[in-house]
Amino acid sequence: MTSCKLSKVIPSCLSFVLKRKKALHFNRNFGRKMTDVSNHLERTAESGRNNITSLATVIGLRQESTTVKSLRLKIHDERLIFKAGQWVDMFMPEVDIVGGFSMYSSPEQLQREGTIDLAVKYSTHPPALWVHTKCNEGTKVYIRVGGDIYYDPGVSEPPHDLLLIAGGIGINPLLSILYHVRDLITLKKKGNLEGDKLIPQKVLLLYSAAKQDELICKNQIEKIVSANDEIKCKFFVTQAESSNGLKAGRIGKEDIKESFNWLKEHQTKTYICGPSPMITDMEKLLIGQGLDKKTILYEKWWIPAETA
């Protein structure tokens, strides 16, 4: 039953992507402003995609918070790869709408273990609802990697610092970038870093969520920070009081200004992911701080207010 359903959905969806896809170079902005949020393929039709579509098996499920569930997928096709910050089209049984979810795991995890991790916030949108109510260990899905905003600098690029600004479930692609940097640092310490890989000099993550329990992977982030002097993180909660290293309120002008007491404006790359208004506000603050607009990279997920 499951295989039959998937075999009907996948060809028509991929045909749609191939017909609408255009050749793209690396774009500063990912996503287009649309009021119809239901069609992930329509919203991302012009985004670059990998030509590999792989069968994947759900081998782990975990409730990360009251509203966020994570999945670990075992990838069957060894040719499938991704870059930190990208997302996947996910074709699910008994769901006619294709889901679009960002990885929060690192590319190195896929190389080591053959797995990727996704975190999905609850929504009545069919793909997210399926993850929260129908998905089980052993379930088979198909995935395809896409996205033009990612972090993969080469040694030919100048040294740089990295600023990551996340709002809510927008942490996903930025966490993938953070884990990628951690893994590169580990490889370097072991003398196994490939010669064409570049590690940022400093990394700062500004991570905001409504409440503390919505700061998913907070413990893992703190472990990375404690193990690496070149990585720092500041947590913000918008619907709670300051406590235990959490700052109450939204990320603001003074927080951005303070970031550059440690980072260097002229060599900082910034990645933002979160609700659309937050991205707009952060970009204005960063430009006001003197950053070149071309160094501010983001993707906008045009999602219903209930899932923001």
Image (tube, rainbow, N blue to C red):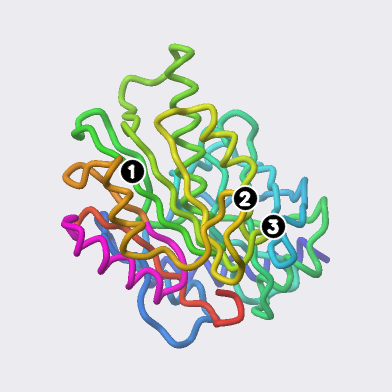
For marks 3 and 1, give the CA distance: 34 Å
**For residue 277, side relative to residue 121 (left or right):** left
Where's the C terminus, which quadrant? bottom right
x and y percentages locating residue 137 in the rendered image: 82, 52
Q: Which residues are magenta?
A: 272-293
Q: Can you tell which of label 2 and label 1 is closer to the viewer?
A: 2
Question: Which quadrant, please, contains the N terminus?
Answer: bottom right
Could you tell me which secondary element the residue under label 2 belongs to? loop
Which class describes the residues within 10 Å of circle 2: few (<14), some (14-19), or many (20+)?
Answer: few
Amino acid at the residue labelled 2 = Asn
Q: Which residue is mark 1?
A: 162
Looking at the image, which is closer to me, 45 or 107? 107
The amino acid beneath tag 3 is Val
Question: What residue is pinned by disc 2?
Answer: 244
Q: Is residue 211 inside the magenta stretch?
A: no
Percent from the top left, x then y, of residue 285?
27, 65
N-terminal label among 2 and 3: 3
User: Does 243 sit above or below residue 100?
Assistant: above
Residue 278 in view:
yes
Circle on res. 141? 3
Task: For label 1, count other residues whose C-alpha is less than 10 Å away and answer few (under 14), some (14-19) or many (20+).
Answer: many
Rendered residue at 54%/34% (across/down): 224
Residue 285 is a magenta residue: yes
Asked which secondary structure carries label 1, the reply is strand
- The answer to which quarter of the image holds residue 238 is bottom right
Residue 276 placement, left or right of 125: left
Q: Residue at x 32, y 49 (%)?
A: 259
